Amino acid sequence: MTELKNDRYIRALLNKEVDKTPVWMMRQAGRYLPEYKATRAQAGDFMSLCRNADLACEVTLQPLRRFDLDAAILFSDILTIPDAMGLGLYFSEGEGPRFERPISCKKDVDNLIMPDPEGELQYVMNAVRTIRRDLKGEVPLIGFSGSPWTLATYMVEGSGSKFFTKIKKMAFAEPQTLHLLLDKLADSVIAYLNAQIAAGAQSVMVFDTWGGILSPRDYKDFSLQYMHKIVDGLTRHYDGQKIPVTLFTKNGGQWIEQIADTGCDAIGLDWTIDIKEAKARVGSRVALQGNMDPSMLYASPERIRQEVATILEGFGTGNGHVFNLGHGIHLDVPPENAKVFVDAVHELSAPYHR
Ligand code: 1CP
C-alpha cells in the first residue's frame, strides 16, 4: 500500500473533508500542450504513443509539471477495447478515429473477441504500472473506459458521428443485436477496469460521451443499465483502499438521480446543469465532478476566476466536490489560461473548507 502525498481527489470523491477543492481537467494531456505535440511526433502516430509505456507515462505527467493538479489520468483512449475486439482502429489525419471493420449485424457481434486485459490490452496495463511507479505517490492515478453505449456508437458508425443514424437504426430495428453487443462490451469494460485497478489505478471513470443523445427511456435501456452492470462488477476495494467510481454522461443532467442509483461514488457533470441544482437533487449520496464550460478557458483571467468563484458558490460548503471542466479541454486553449483556472480553484475554494 502506498501513501498518497496528495489525496484530496480521492477524499472528495468519497465525501470526506479536504483543505481545498481538488481539480483536474478532462483531456489534460493533449494537443494544447507543445510538449505533448513533441512527444507525439517522437512516437509517430497516436496509437504508437498509447502502446509505448514510457512515452504514455511521459505525456501523462506533462500537465502535472505545469499545473498544480490533484490527479493524473492514464494516457490512453476509450477505443482501445473495440480495437482489441478486432475492429482495426486507425486515425486518419485531421479526421479522428475510424474502424476498418465496423459492426453491422449479429454475426459481427458473435465474432467479436473478448479481449484479455493482460493479453491484447497489456500495453494499457504496462502504461498504468509505469505511471504509478513514476508518480511516486504525488497524486492519485485515474483509470478509465468508455461506456458500452459510447463504445458501441463508434463501433457501429465506424467513426465519430453527428446524427448517429446507424446505431439508432440498430437500436430501434434490431434491439437484440445491440443488447448483445452492449452486454459483451460491459463484460469487457469490467475486466479492463478491474485489470487497471490491479495494475495501479486508484480511481476509475466511465465516459458516456454519447448517452445524452438518447431519449430518457432509451438512455435507461441502452446506456445506464450497462453502466449499472459495470458498477456492480468493479473491484471497489483494492490494496486496503476504496476505489471510487465516477460516471460521466455528457448531457445527462436530467438523469442524475438515476445515475446515483447505480451505486457509483461520483457523477461527472457537463456545464448544461447548474451545480447548485444538481447538489439539491442528489444531496450527499454521491460526489459531483465538474462543471465549467471548457470554452471559458478562452476568456480573460478575471472572467475565468469569476466563473470558478460562481461554481464554488453554487456548490457551497460541504464535502464531495471535484472541480473539473464539463468536457475535454479544447486544443487551442493557451496553457497559461489552464494555469489560471487550476490556481483559482485552490485559492478560491479554501474558505469553503474551514
Ligand atoms: O492527435 C492526437 O494526439 C489524438 C487526440 C486524442 C487524445 C489526446 C485522442 C483521439 N484520444 C486522446 C486521449 C484521451 N482520450 C484520453 C487521455 C488523455 C487525458 O484525458 O488527459 C481520454 C480520457 C480520452 C477519452 C476519449 N476518447 C473519449 C471520452 C471523453 C470525451 O472527451 O468525450 C472519447 C469520446 C474518445 C474518442 C476519441 N479519441 C480521439 C479523439 C479525437 C476522439 C473523439 C472523436 C469524436 O469526437 O467523436
Image (cartoon, rainbow, N blue to C red):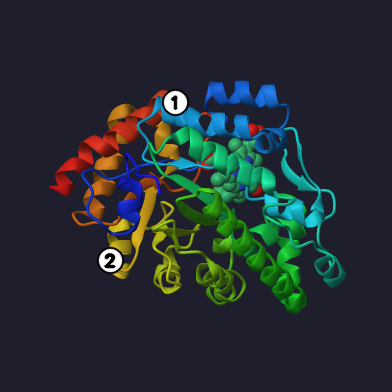
Quadrant hosting residue 156: bottom right
Q: Which residue corresponds to mark 2?
A: 284
Residue count near mark 2 (Cα–Cα under 10 Å), binned few <14, some 14–19, many ≥20: some
Q: Amino acid at mark 1?
A: Pro
Q: Amino acid at mark 2?
A: Ser
Secondary structure, mark 1, is helix
Badge 2 residue CB within 8 Å of ligand 1? no
| Most foreground residue, 242 or 83 | 242
Asked whether residue 331 appears in the rendered view, the answer is no
User: In 3D space, how far apart are the residues under numbered discs 1 and 2 (Cα atoms)?
Assistant: 34 Å
**Upstream in sequence: badge 1 or badge 2:** 2
296 to 13, vertically: above or below: above
Residue 232 place in picture, x, y as percent: 51, 72
Q: Is 4 left or right of 41, judged from the image as shown?
A: left
Residue drawn at 44 percent across, 48 percent down: 326
26 to 240, vertically: above or below: above
Q: Which residue corresponds to mark 1?
A: 335
Badge 1 residue CB within 8 Å of ligand 1? no
Residue farthest along the front direction in this orientation: 1
Ligand 1 position by quadrant? top right
Residue drawn at 42 percent across, 71 percent down: 263
Quadrant hosting residue 102: bottom right
Residue 260 place in picture, x, y as percent: 40, 70
| Most foreground residue, 214 or 190 | 190
Residue 47 place in picture, x, y as percent: 71, 37
Residue 317 place in picture, x, y as percent: 18, 54
